[in-house]
Each structure stands twice: as structure tokens, then as C-alpha cells.
Amino acid sequence: MTVVRSVSPKDIGKVLARTNKVILGHQKRAILEAAALGSELVARSAPVDTGRLKQSVRLRRKGASGHPEIVADAPHAGPVEAGARPHWAPLRPLIGWVRRKVGAAAKSAGIRVPPKVGLYRGRSARAWAAYNRRSRIRDAYVGGVLKIARQVQLKIAHKGTKPTWFMRRNLPRMGKILGEMLEAAKIKALRDLGNSSSGGAT
């Protein structure tokens, strides 16, 4: 169905302004909805250790234009996404990472991890080991965790860390979603403009 509307020359400016406003309104809503879906895709793709990276993925408005952008603002988001060059990583976070990995592996294998292995708040790995030296089993566990953490530290020092591209690998899919939503927005805008027209139909 084609909608025909007669417009006087003096009304052309108003008609164009309204047309532009309707189209832009639908486009902005489509972009916002596509970005919201994109942030969900990125969050689902983010590697999970403590969950902080996944939780840091969010949608925010950029600048005065208010255009949405997807960000992951956890401190380690950049190195996880793009990897890192060889560097000397601090040992304490690695100890926590190894403890979580060892605990999860032991649990899935039905192996009992020594209880109440404290997360010492100091900076020294030696102090952390001394803090937990209360039994042979616990001492062996702590020693094993430290050994693995130091091996990981040395590997990072020599090879760096590999990228995961949890955000970049979703870009093609997000682009497809945006294209589909903009196309649907165009159809909605034309329908709204047609419904508001006061012309005849042929």
C-alpha cells in the first residue's frame, strides 16, 4: 500500500523535521537495544574466575550524544581481552587463582582440600605459608599451591598471557544484530509516519 500526502511548500520544513525526528527516534531505540543485547553476549563470553570481570561488563552512555557503548571496566579486563607481554606478575593474586583452581579440581575429583586455609592479607608468600603451617597436610597443600603459583609467575615472565578476545569475537554477531534492529526500526518509522499522514491511499 502506497500512502500519498499532499504537502504545501510552506509545510515542507515541518514535515521533514517530523520525519527526521521519527526516524532518528526509532534508530536510537534500536541502537540502545542492540547494545544491551551485545553487552549480554560479551558478559556470557567473559572468562570466569572470581566473577568480577563478567560483572564489570555493562552498558553506558557516551558523551553528550548519549550513544551507548559496551565496557568491561574490571582492572584486569584489558589483559584478559588482549593478552599481555611478558612481565613479572605479583604472586599474591596468583596464589588466590591457584587456590580456586586447585579447590575446584579437587572438588570435582572428590578429593578433600584441607579446611580453613587462610587467605593471608600480607604481601609476602612466605608469610602466607607460615600463617597456614598448622599440620602436615595443610603445610603440603600450601607448599603445592605456592609451587604452582611460582611456576605460573615464571611462565608469565617468559611468555606473557594469551588473549581471550571475549569482546572482539562477538563484534560480527553484534553487527548483525544491529543491522537487523535498524532495519526493523526503519519499517516501524515508516509505519508510524504513514499512520500519522492525512492523505489518501492508492
Image (cartoon, grey):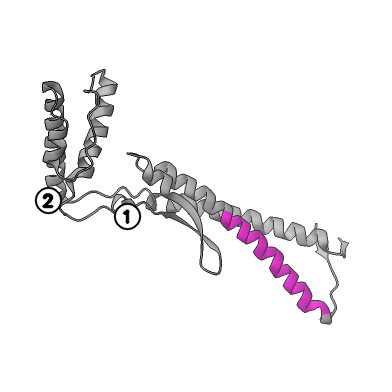
Q: Residues within 10 Å of mark 1 (few under 14, many from 20)?
A: some
Could you tell me which residue is drawn at 52 percent across and 53 percent down? 35
Kindly indicate the quadrant of the structure image that contains residue 101: top left
Tag 2 residue: 158
130 above or below 75?
above
Q: In the structure shown, which secondary structural element does the residue marked by tag 2 occupy?
A: helix
Horizontally, residue 60 falls left or right of residue 105, namely: right
Closer to the camera in the image, 157 or 14: 157
Could you tell me which residue is drawn at 71 percent across and 59 percent down? 189
Q: Percent position (x, y) of residue 193?
A: 77, 62
Could you tell me which residue is drawn at 65 percent across and 56 percent down? 185
Could you tell me which residue is drawn at 14 percent across and 21 percent down? 137
| Residue 13 shown in magenta | yes
Quadrant showing the N terminus? bottom right
137 above or below 176?
above
Cα distance between the residues tagged 1 and 2: 19 Å
Q: Amino acid at mark 2?
A: His
Q: Which mark is residue 78?
A: 1
Q: Percent position (x, y) of residue 188?
A: 70, 55
Q: Amino acid at mark 1?
A: Gly
Q: Earlier in the sequence, mark 1 or mark 2?
A: 1
Quadrant showing the C terminus? bottom right
Q: Percent position (x, y) of residue 201?
A: 86, 60
Q: Residues within 10 Å of mark 2 (few under 14, many from 20)?
A: few
Give the magenta part as a residue range: 11-32
Horizontally, residue 65 falls left or right of residue 148, namely: right
Q: In the structure shown, which secondary structural element does the residue marked by tag 1 occupy?
A: helix
Outermost residue on the top side: it is 110
Kindly indicate the quadrant of the structure image that contains residue 30: bottom right
Closer to the camera in the image, 161 or 121: 121
Q: Main secondary structure of the magenta part?
A: helix
Circle 1/circle 2 CB separation < 8 Å? no
